[in-house]
Amino acid sequence: MNRRHLMTGAIAGLAASTLPAAAQAAGIPVGAIEILTGPAAAYGIAIKAGLELALDTINQKGILGGQKIALTVEDSAGDKNQAINAARKLIGRDKAVLIIGPTLSNEMFAVGPVTNERKVPTIGTSTTATGITEIGPYIFRTSLPESDVVPVTFKKAQARGVKTVALMYANDDAFSKSGFDVMKAAAEKLGLKILTIETFGSKDTDFSAQLTKVKGLKPDAVTISALVEPVSGVLLQARQLGFGKETLFIGGNGSNSPKLGDIAGAAADGMIVGSPWFIAKPDPLNTAFVAAFKAKYNKDPDQFAAQAYDCMFIAAAAIERAGAADSEKITAALAKTSYTGVMGPFAFTAGRDPASSEGVVVLEMKGGKFGIAS
C-alpha cells in the first residue's frame, strides 16, 4: 500500500527518543480508552480496529529511529468512572505519552479534566458534543463536531420539502443533549417550524407516548438525537404505530452506524444522517483502506473505524515531529500536524478541533445499509 500520505512532511528525519532504553525496547507507550463491552460497544470495537489497522503500517517502518508504537487499549464499558480509572492506569502504570479516546462525549467530559491536569495529550476520535476541546489545552479531537454536520443534513431535508419537525432526544447523556441543541438551532436557522420536543431515557424501551403525540401533529420530519440502540427502538416502534414514508426521520452522529440496520432492519429505511466519511468515497486512499480493513477483519469499516485509522497516523506524525516520546512536545507538535488520509485533508484549528468540514455527505438507510442520499 502506498503510504506517502502517512505523514505530510512529518516523518522526514529520524530522531532519538528520550525514553529510557528499556522503554524504547518495549515501544512508545500510547493508550486508548474505548467501549469494548456493553450496549455501545459497536462504536469502540470499530475504533479499536481502525487504530490497530493503522499500526500495522506505522510499525512496519517505525518512528523515532525505527521504534514501534505500543498501543494499550482499555475498556471503559461506557462507564465514566471506569473510563477515569482507565486513564489513571494508562498514565500512572503504562506511562502513556498520548491517549486516544474515550469513545463518547460523556466519557470525555469525565476523563478530559484528568488527562489535561496530568498534561497528557488526549485525542477524541468520536466525541462530537459541544465543549469537548474547551476542557483544556491538552484535549484535541479529530471528529467533526455535530455543529458542522447536522446543518448539512437539515439543508438536505429542507430541500426535500420539510417545513415542520418534531425533535426527540435522550435527555440523560451529554452527547444526545448536545446533538439536540445543534438540531434545534439548525431547525430555527432554516426557519423550520418545531411542533414539539419530546425526551426519553437512553435505556428506555417504550416510546409510544412520545410517538403517539408526534404522530398526531403530523410533522414532515422527526429528528432523533441519541445513541444507536435507542434510535433503533424509536424507529421500530414508530413503524408499529403507523409512521410511513411520508415522515422523514433524521439522525445525528449516534445513528451513523451499521448497527442501525442490524437492529432496526427495514424500520430504519429512509432515515438520513450526515457523515464526514462514506465507504464508497472514490479516493485511492479510501479504497485502499476499505480493502485492507476487509482483508483484516472480514467486514466493512464504518465512520468510526475510518476516523480512528486517520487519528493513529496523526498521532504518529505528532510523535515523530516532536522528536521524542514526550507528552509536552507531542502536544505542541499536534497543533502543527497536517495530514491527508481517508477522511481527506486534516489540520487542527487553534482550538484543537478539525479545521475543515468539507466533504460532509448526507447518507440514507436503504435495505439495512447506508448509501448517498438523493
Image (cartoon, grey):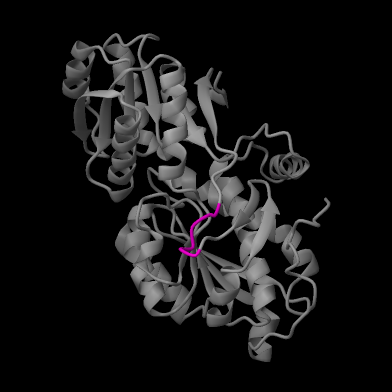
Which residue is drawn at the image coordinates 64% and 74% (left, top)?
Answer: 319
From the viewer's perspective, tell me whether residue 360 is left or right of residue 54: left
From the viewer's perspective, tell me whether residue 184 is left or right of residue 132: left
Q: Is residue 78 visible?
A: no
Which residue is drawn at the image coordinates 53% and 81% (left, top)?
Answer: 328
Closest to the observer: 312 or 341? 341
Which residue is drawn at the image coordinates 31% and 46% (left, top)?
Answer: 178
Q: Is residue 190 visible?
A: yes
Q: Position of residue 76 (x, y in %)?
A: 40, 58
Q: Look at the picture and state if 155 lies above or below 92.
A: above
Return the residue found at the far bottom: 20
Which residue is drawn at the image coordinates 73% and 69% (left, top)?
Answer: 10
Q: For the magenta stretch, what is the residue range?
A: 350-355
Q: Position of residue 154 (x, y in %)?
A: 41, 28
- Name which quarter of the figure residue 332 lies in: bottom right
Q: Position of residue 126 (x, y in %)?
A: 47, 50
Closest to the observer: 322 or 188? 188
> How many numbered markers are drawn?
0
In magenta stretch: residue 200: no
Q: Look at the picture and state if 198 lies above or below 93.
A: above
